[in-house]
Structure formats: C-alpha cells, structure tokens
Image: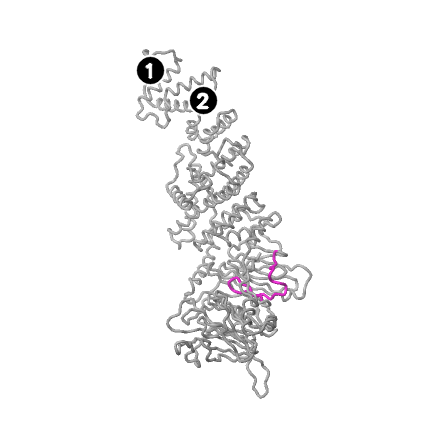
Amino acid sequence: MLHLRATFDLQQDVVSRVFKKEATVGTIKEFSGTVDTRIINIERDGAVLYSWKGTTGTTRIGKYEPNTKQNKLLYTFDSEVFVSSCSLNKEESLLAVSLKQRTRVEEGLKPVSKCLTLLIEIHPINNTKVLKAVDCRVRVQFIYPEEERNSMMESHLLLVTEDGYAEQFHVTLVKQDGYRVVMQNPERLPKDRVAEDFSWVQWDGQAQRLFYLTYREKAVLKCVQFYHNRICETLFELPMEWPSNPFTCMRFVNLGFDHHQDPQHRREEMRMAVYTNRTERSMCVCYSRPAAVTQEITYTIVLVHRGCSKTFTVALEGVPNPCSAELLPLFIPIGYYIVVFLAGHFLHCINTRQQELLCYSLFLTGADAELGVLGPESVVLSLPVSSLLDLNTGRIYTAELSSAFLLDLLNCSHSRPDPQCLAALHCLLVHMGPNPKLELKVIDWICDNVMPFDTFDQIQEFILASLYRIAYRNSLSVDKVLAYSSVFEKKIPEGLDKVSGVTCTKELHAEPLFRGKARSLEGYWEELQWGTEMTKYFEAVPNPRFRTSQSLPDWTKLLATLKSPNMKSSCCPRHIEENTKKVLSVVDSWNLGQKMVPLFQEEDQHQRALIGLMVDKLREHLNRHLPRLGKKKIDVLAVNYVAKLLELTRQVLECVWTKYNLGPRVMCLTQPGSSVDWAVFHVMSRILEATKTLCLPLPPGYHTLLAVLGVRCLPRHTFLQYLDHGVLQLTETFVSRLMTDLDNSDANEELKFSILKRLPEPMEQKICHLWDHPISSACISRNYVRGLLEKRAKTKGSTLIEIDHAGFRPEFLPLTYLAKILSDMEDKAQNPFEEQENVDARFVEETALKQTLIVLGFDEK
C-alpha cells in the first residue's frame, strides 16, 4: 500500500564518504558498524545534522545537504561529548548544541549540571556562549523565517526544556574583517518566554509553529505562530476532553532525536501528533494509547476543520502478547490522508477530507499491511512532509501511496470487499489526480468490469469523484457543497457502512478558539477559522451538497414542455439555452484537435436543455451556500463543472475507441455488429444507465451513436424493445441515416415502418421526405392534402370548379376534381407551402395513381 523511497542513507551518504577522508580502510569498517554516527536533527530545508566520534576520539557535528548531496563539517569538540540536540541557523553562522553531561563527581571537581546548552559561532569557528546549564533535558531549534531578511542580520533560537517552558533568544550578528560573522553583545542576548506549563510539545518546521499541551483544570492544545520579525503569538487553542493529563513526563515531537535519553523516558504513555495541511486548510490531532488488556488498539483523529473526532478500535489478532501493552501505532501524513500503521498488524489509510463513511478509508491487514523495507526490529519515527526515519539503519524514506497496489486491488475486485474497492478508486481519482495515464488505466478497468458492484456504481463514482477533484482544485470552498460520491444519492447500502476489522465512533469535538490577528502564511489561520465556521453552518442546513438527481422534477417538467405538440422542438427558455451555449463553447475550446468519437456534431435538443438546466441548478446552489465567491466566479465554476462532465464522457469513449481500435465503420448501418461493437455498446449502455439515474446530461450525439450500435448489434425485436423502454432514443440524425443508408428489403422496410410509428409527428413528417418509398410518398400526400383542406374549410363561401376542356384527357374524375381544388388553392396562396419541399397537386395525383396500381396488382413497390 505504501511505497517507501529512500532519500537518505547514513551509511552510504555519510559514513562511506566522510570517514574515508580521516581514517584507514580498517577503521572505516569499525566505525560503520558502530552507533557512533547518529542523526541529531533535520532542518526545514531538509539538511541532516549528525554527530560522530572522530579518529582522535573527539565528537564532531556535520551536515548533509540533500540538494548537492555533499557533507560539511560544522564543528569539532575538544573531547568526546554526548550531543542530545543541535540546530543550525539559516546562514550557517551559528550552531546551537545541547549536551548531556556525566553527573558523577570527578576527583577535585564539583558536580556538573545534567544538560549544557551552547551557542557557537562557526563562520569561522570563534566564540562559544553558554545559554543554559540545567538539570533537565533541553531541545534547541533555530527558527527559519518564511520571508526574506531585512538588512539587519539576526537569528532567532528556540529553547524547549523538560521543565515545561520554551524561550526564544534573539541573536544579532555583525560582520568583522569583512568575513567573520560574530554575535553582537553575546553576554546579554534578549529572550522572550514563549510558552510554559506544558507536558507535550511539537515543532512544525514547515510552518514555523509550536504546538504544546497544557493541563490545569483541563487539557488544552495551544499553538504559537512565529514570524520573521521577532514576533510570535498564540493564535489557536483547542480543548481536549481528557479526564487527566496523559503525559507523566515531557514528550518532544519533531525537535531532533536524543540518543542519550534515560530509559524511563523512552516508554510512551500516549503517542500524539498534530498535522496541518496548508493546501487543504486542515488540521488533524492524532493520538493513541498502548493496547489494553483486551488486546485492542484505539486511536483517535480529531478533525479540527470538520469539528468532530473519530475514534477507531482494532482488535489485534493472534495469541495475546504481554508486549502488546507497549505497542503504539505510527501516524504518517500523506496529503489529506493520515496513515495509521502498526507493524505486523494493520495499516489504516484514513481519508480526512471525505470522512463521512468508513468505506472511503482503506483498512488493510496481513501481507497488504507490510512495509517491506522496514524489518521487524526497525525503530521508526514519523517525520514531517510524509517521511519516515529508521533509527536503527539511519535511513530516511519518503512515503507515498502506491498507485500500482491500488490498481492491483481493483483488478482483483472480485475477491476484495466492496469498501476496499471504493476506497481504492477514490484514492486513485482524487488523491493521485490529475494523472492522465492513471485515469486511462482506471477507465480501462471500468471497461473490463462494466457491471456495477453490489453497493456502488463505479461509473458514477468515476464521474463524480473526478468532477469533485477538478472543482476542488479550482476553489477549495466547494469542498462541502459538491458531491464526491453517488453513495449518498440513496439509502446507504449495508455493505458500506461497516468495514471488517475496524470500528469507528464519531463525536462532535469542542470548538477551537482563535486568538490574535491571523497574519500567518498564506492565510492558513483565516481559512481554518472560516472552514470551522462553515462546518457549523453546513451541519445545520439540509442537503448542503449538490445532488444532480434532485433536478429530476424540473427536468421532467421541462422535457414535457419540449415534447408538447403545441410547441416547436427548438423552444427552450432563453436562459437555459444561453447556459448551454456557454458550456459547449468551453468544450469546443478544450478539443481543438482531431476527435476520434463522433460527438458534439449535431443538435440534440433534449440534451441541450438538460445541460442548461444543470448549470442553472448548480449556479443556484452555489449562490445559496457560498455567496462570498461572487456571482462571476460562481458562474464560471458552474459552466466549467458541466463542461468537464461532458468532457469526461468523451474521454471515456476516446479510451474505449483506442482500446478496441474503432474507426469510422462504427457508423456504417449496413454492416452487422461484431463482438467489439457489442462490447462498446455494452459500455455505452452502462454509461447511459449511470448518468440517467443521476440526471446527468450526455454530449450531443451520444444517443445517435448508441442507437447506431444498437441497431447493428441487437436483434430487431430487441432493438424495438429498447426503444419502447426508453433505453435507446430515436434522434433525427439516426433516423435520417437509417432511412437513407438501408435499402428497402422486406426486413429493412419492416424496421423502417416500426420506427416511423414511434416517431413524434413533427419528426415523422421530416423523415418521410428522406425515404424514397410509396408509403412515405402517400404519407407526404396525406399530410399535404390535410393541411390544404383544413385551411380551405376555414374560408367562407364555396368555390366553383371549372374544368378546362381544351386540355381534356381521359382521367379519374374524383381524383381530377381533388387535384383541381388543390391547384386552385396553391395559386391563391401568398406563400405556397415552401416547407413542403416541392410537394404540389401534381405530386399528390401521381402518388395516388401509383398507390392504386399497387393495390390492384398492376405495379410493384
């Protein structure tokens, strides 16, 4: 499930390079097998700080630069020391070091403090300033400002102590002799008290934030934001509903790695971490306690941006193990997923964005939950930016969700539970998109597994999840108002509300308190505050997410209006038609190249109306719930959303055309359908079924293409049943091709007659003019005569018919009389029936005589 890519190897990147410069080959082997080389800290820019014992027995501190893959010696102590924490400022002129000292009384010497914290000038090596000499552990961390420095050279150092307080030192630097960087007035460095009375603390190096937990009357999680101009302020407080303080001793998170801490400090009563995502504007507080006597692991994710918490419980399989009381899962942030990993037991990939149901998170056990590069003896720590550190090997890995694993899971969907398949599908489409190659593989899987699952429709999920990803990328605000799954369109199936192996309890969480003026990076705090407020709003309003199926009543009403005999087929409300024009214009601008599938090449009035209606309803929904976006942006979002919907359908068909190597022959009605044509017809029928259920429009031309494949692949009686049940629709383009391309054999005549009977009257009259057949001629004549006589009946008086004896010829007098009436009415008409396409009295007369001869058996069809 997780792909771990090694980005740093202590042995290869440090030991094998640095030690070669100062030791013999034999000594290299000696050092490479010891634990003297240790990773101490990882700075914000990815630089790795490490210490080792040199050939002379002195302790040295070095830096590995990941961009250049070069090592640099920073400082050498005069003797062997025990480095528990260190940090390097951005300009590489100051090194802060915290040393653990021996507490035994040397002969003739006084007792020394347990921890000595130093500030060392290293550009070049010069003075050393003692910052603290205390009997508690101290962690040091330079603050890396986001903005560029001003002309004044200054560094800011954070000291966090085991006694539960944090201080910020401000160090002003000056240049001497043109190159020496030294501290100005090192004896009196100004400092500020940042936080106090805490028992757990975490440094967020990427965002320059310090999270800490205080417990007086109740537990409160607080956050201090640091800025480039010395300023820091407490912006955030979150009450934690714990009956007592879960930490009996200080816990440091992301403040380096102390390899010399006492054994009693290594056992964790609770593991806790805070993850913020600047892109998602989200915050998650994760914590877990060791397994109870019942052999169950419980872990909780507080979704601050959603205003709730979720507690998961997993029963550990196998024989009860006394060591399980010390087991704690590892939390790994990957995008908007929080991966919870317990080696040898399970891997739970929790979706923090689509968190309504368990089925959108992936829970794995057994071989699926193994991380191959990490052995059973690995001591793994979670680092920021989706990274892991194996303390035993000194390797750092970047963790990624494996698309290959997820695709393999889908390809074995017949042996996988539906929730796993649904979670994998959403992860591929939303988290890993946009990725054209990956989307093609998902579409290929859909074509090979076209029938819907028992609990969800994969075509509907592909459409809605893809649309959600695209809209969310353009505007984060639509997260809570657009649908991402079709599961919520109906009653949630029983197979999706529970996941085997894990249970979940959801609770509302105490509201966070935002303090001070939010001036942080890219408006994170403002967006988080707005998101929490909007969460309360969306919890109170019904149906905050846009559901296309709710447009069905309006669509039924509009469709009835379009089919009304009192209205022309082109009649549609003007604003609906304007919406459609905007959408099709956007689609045309996206597809300027050659198109394989014959879509968007005809007027499909019904689909045009549905396209415009969907834009109208989506615009109305966004204006109701997100007015702050503004009408202009909302209009663009609605138009692009529907345009992308049509484009997704075209994209699926393009993939199908490529998969089966189809060409122009698809539209040839004279050739029977092959097995390939049948496969394409099946896929297109499923797309029609999926979109119709959700009341989604299809590209103009889709119904024509599907009808062509239907008449080629289906038996004639089955094809007519598909028409009667509304599966296939008779478009004017399809019927026109059928009338002209097929000959007038008995079977084809029967098909044409059957189709003519199913056409609405306006279309029937048009189609009759395209079919060269006596029956169509008779139909044209009847309609022509009916129209003329209805107009004649409305005129007053009678008309005297005078027979021209000069041109007399033997005629059938009743027919002659009728032809004369029609001819006279044509002569009196101001605009004689232009729409009848050269139909006149003479045509009617010839058609009537032809029909008579056929009936009497004197002529053939």
Q: Which residue appears at 39% of the width and 22% of the height?
A: 785
Instruction: Measuring from the top left, give residue 421's x and y in whole percent.
Output: 57, 50
Instruction: Measuring from the top left, give residue 331's x and y in whole percent.
Output: 56, 62
- The span shown in magenta is 368-390
> Circles 2 and 1: CB distance less than 8 Å?
no
Give the alpha-carbon distance from disc 2 to disc 1, as whole Å: 29 Å
Q: Report the amino acid beneath label 1.
A: Ile
Disc 2: CA contacts within 10 A as few (<14), some (14-19) or many (>=20): some
Instruction: Measuring from the top left, give residue 489's x and y in whole percent.
Output: 52, 47
Q: Report the amino acid beneath label 2.
A: Pro
Residue 435 visible, this orientation: yes
Residue 608 vs residue 672, the one in the foreground = 672
For this view, does 48 lie left or right of residue 796? right
Query: Which residue is disc 1 drawn over?
Result: 801
Q: Secondary structure at mark 2?
A: helix
Residue 172 vs residue 196, the one in the foreground = 172
- Which of pointers 2 and 1 lies earlier in the amino acid sequence? 2
Q: Which residue appears at 42% of the width and 18% of the height?
A: 848
Query: Which residue is disc 2 drawn over?
Result: 774
Q: Which one is closest to the eye, mark 2 or mark 1?
A: 2
